[in-house]
Structures are given as structure tokens and as C-alpha cells.
Image (cartoon, rainbow, N blue to C red):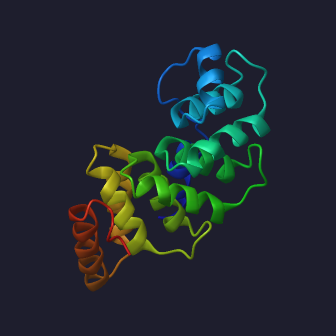
Amino acid sequence: MKKSLSVIALLLLLCSPVFSQTPDLDEARRLAAQGDAEAQTNLGVMYANGEGVPQNDAEAVKWSRLAAAQGYAIAQYNLGVMYANGAGVSQNYAEAVHWYRLAAEQGHAIAQYNLGVMYANGRGVPQNYARAYLWFSMAAAQGNEMATENREKASEELTSEALNSAQQLATRCFDSGYTQCE
């Protein structure tokens, strides 16, 4: 069972950071320098993927961190991916969890999924199938099919009582707009 969760997780965690929209390089640089979080995110992705600029993970982290510090969920997710994969930073699962959580609490479905993966596999946090179930449920509610599959696998690892408790927590989390997830 644990191997199935790990294989599915690995497929997603190796994805590149994502754009918030397709940027124009000059415009992205101008706006990023002015502190625009979306432009900073886009510039970070351009550096991460070598799109229009030489590929440079350190620059990708720099721009993503600036946007993430402003609370921009896509940048927080991207920074989580960078920490999970050791791209431009030392691999640090606990930091990946931190950034995924910030994005997940803003409703970022892939961050919610990745946070579930981290709990299911005990990466950066103690292994906890109830927490994995919770975050897979949040992502599944937004149509993430892999989250739906992994939620079912996580539920198989829980006792009936633990599953009931996880379901109640998931309902509270969802109903609160992700503010009461702990």
C-alpha cells in the first residue's frame, strides 16, 4: 500500500513550477522589480524552466521566494516543489511541507494534494494517514483525480474510528475555507 502512494507522489513532486499566466520577459522583469507577486512568480518559473532566460535554479528560488513572502499561493506551491526536489535549494521536506501548507490553506489543489502525499509518506512530517486523508479530500473536492485515488488508499490504512475522525476534520476544514484544518 505504502509503495503505491509513493509512486503516485513521485510523479507529481517532480513536476516543474507553474506559471500563473504566460509572461512577456521584459514586462515580467519590470513588474517583478516593482514587487508584483504574479510577475515575480512568472519570472521564477522562467528561470526554473529556462524559458526566455538561461535556466538558473537560484534565480528561480529568489523570485519565487519574493512572491511567496507576499502570500501568493502559486509561488508558495512552486517553492514547495523546489524544496521537495532540491532545485536551487538543499532538499528539505520540512520546508516543502511549510510552503505546500501555506498554498493549500489558500485552496491551491495541487499543494493540497502534495501535502497529503507528504503526510502519507512521512516526508517532512510524521507519517499520518488521517492528515493525508484530510488533504487528499480537499484536493479531491476540487476535482483532482489522483487525490481521490490516494484518499481511498489512505482510508484503508485507518481504523473505522480514525477514518470517521478524519472525515469530520475534512468537513470542518472545507466548510471553514481551509482555516480550521488542524
Percent position of residue 159, x then y: 32, 82
Residue at 77% over, 26% down = 55
Residue at 38% over, 61% down = 135
Location of residue 46 (image quadrant): top right
Location of residue 49 with respect to 127 vertically, above or below? above
The residue lying toward the viewer, choosing from 34 and 62, is 34
Percent position of residue 122, x then y: 57, 70
Location of residue 5 with respect to 46 vertically, above or below? below
| Left or right: 161 as drawn, with respect to 52 | left
Residue at 40% over, 58% down = 105
Percent position of residue 172, x then y: 23, 70
Location of residue 130 (image quadrant): bottom left
Location of residue 143 with respect to 173 vertically, above or below? above
How many numbered marks, from 0 up?
0
| Left or right: 158 as drawn, with respect to 6 | left
Q: Residue furthest bottom?
A: 161
Q: Residue furthest front?
A: 34
Residue 159 visible from this viewpoint? yes
The residue lying toward the viewer, choosing from 2 and 55, is 55
Name the quarter where the C terminus is drawn: bottom left
The residue lying toward the viewer, choosing from 176 and 113, is 176
Percent position of residue 10, x then y: 58, 48
| Left or right: 49 as drawn, with respect to 103 | right
Residue 4 visible from this viewpoint? no
Location of residue 168 with respect to 18 vertically, above or below? below
Residue at 72% over, 22% down = 50
The residue lying toward the viewer, choosing from 32 and 22, is 32
